[in-house]
Image (cartoon, rainbow, N blue to C red):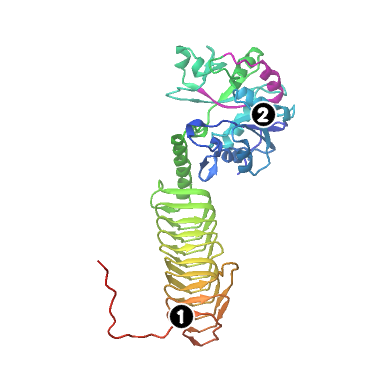
Amino acid sequence: MSQPSPSFDLPLAIITLAAGKGSRMRSDLPKVLHTLAGKPMLQHVLDSASQLAGARQYVVIGHGAEQVQAAIAQDVCWAIQQQQQGTGHAVAQALPEVPDDALVLVLYGDVPLITPATLSALLQQTHASKGQEGGLALLTIELVDATGYGRIVRDESGNIQAIVEHKDATPEQRAIGEVNTGILAVSASHLRRWLPLLSANNVQGEYYLTDIVALAVAEGIAVRAIHPQHEHEVQGVNDRLQLAGLERVFQRQQADNLLRLGVALADPARLDIRGSLTVGHDVAIDVGCIFEGDVILGDGVTIGPYCVIRNSQLAAATRVEAYCHIDEAAVAQACVVGPYARLRPGADLANGARVGNFCEVKKAHIGAGSKVNHLSYIGDAEVGTNVNIGAGTITCNYDGVNKALTRIGDNAFIGSNSALVAPVAIGANVTIGAGSVIVSPVADHQLAIARGKQRNIDGWQRPVKKC
């Protein structure tokens, strides 16, 4: 749901800093491309920011710039920070493309759980100051252990005076619990005036964006701060341990939302949603399930343990047994899938169809009431209604170059261990004898048997192992 826009007429420029390498991730992949819930952290930030009406997004990249650009499909304005010389320097790389009259919101590509509601509230704070340019708004938070964070220094009246980075702070300043998150909002005109005044005369030898607070105070410009509703909104990721922690926060949020919708979760802590999951009434999900992309579960659907379902729709009263993989498939009402079944892209099950133990279906329609219960592969096929496909049956759909179609008519019975060599058509009410290799069409109501003649040899001596 989109969040309300700030109540003033300024273009909104969102600058997201994403140039760092992330050496503590111990990976060649740029830090902001490491995934949370199956999506790059940077994409989470951009998605939240995009819900602010009228926003134009700018992303500052450096390490792995080409990889980052290739991974992010949406329309953003890219700026390159060739050398990482601090947050102030990073913002300066994007500022030339920002309109002079814009309000600038600075975000971070490794802070993935920031919410549109918090950002909207922060933007409102800039308008609390008189004048078209507004003031400076900071997102701060109180921490019990503030080690490593910039401290918010206030005067005796509680007015913000400066942000002092941890490495530059005195012992008295390090005792302060209110810290800077780095997320702020301020007019572009203020930034154009202040950024050239920043100095790298500090322990890190970098241009700190936080130093604009002291510049604002010196000019008598109001500096206000708000806190996020939840601490995890502003938690950054520096290593895989922190990323794993935020993953569980995010997944628990998804699980809680499902519980509020009435979904029965066997264990809310053992669920992963990596996309969107839409559910009907009386849905039940067992432990260890993963949902990717866009998944829709109809009323009364039950999902057994350790299933993976991706970009699929399952209609009402369908039951999925344990350890199934369902990928880009459509499953109609009252079907039974599994256990240990795999529905590949293009699998289409009509009402009441069954696909059971260790079966695989790919680009095939399984008609209403039809059964593929055991150890079978059905690919590139049109299967009619009330068909029974015996164990070990395969459609031989690939000749090494091209795929071909198998058609099976209504009420056909396919004996176990049969091979249907496509292209081939099997009529309605046909019976295929077990162990047959069918290469020619079979007309309605026929029995087809195609197997080698059995020979029984008397006195057969088994081979003896040589010493």
Q: Residue at x 58, y 73 (%)?
A: 405
Residue 56 shows in this picture: no
- Quadrant in which the C terminus is drawn: bottom left
Q: Position of residue 458 (x, y in %)?
A: 29, 86
Contact? badges 1 and 2 (CB < 8 Å): no
Q: Residue at x 48, y 72 (%)?
A: 394
Provide the residue designation for mark 1. Answer: 436
For residue 187: magenta? yes
How many numbered circles does the render carry?
2
Disc on the earlier residue, 1 or 2: 2
Q: Secondary structure at mark 1?
A: loop
- Quadrant in which the N terminus is drawn: top right
Give the alpha-carbon distance from disc 1 to disc 2, as whole Å.
71 Å
Q: Secondary structure at mark 2?
A: strand
Q: Position of residue 187 (x, y in %)?
A: 69, 25
Provide the residue designation for mark 2. Answer: 104
Q: Position of residue 224 (x, y in %)?
A: 59, 22
Q: Residue at x 46, y 80 (%)?
A: 436
Q: Residue furthest bottom?
A: 446
**Stretch of the chain drawn in magenta:** 179-201
Depth order, front residue of 115/94: 94
Q: Residue at x 46, y 72 (%)?
A: 372
Reply above or below: 406 against 8: below
Q: Which mark is residue 175?
A: none
Left/right of residue 380 with respect to residue 460 in the rendered view: right
Mark 2 crowdedness (10 Å alpha carbons): few <14, some 14-19, many ≥20: many
The amino acid type found where label 1 is placed reads Ser
Depth order, front residue of 122/165: 165
The amino acid type found where label 2 is placed reads Val
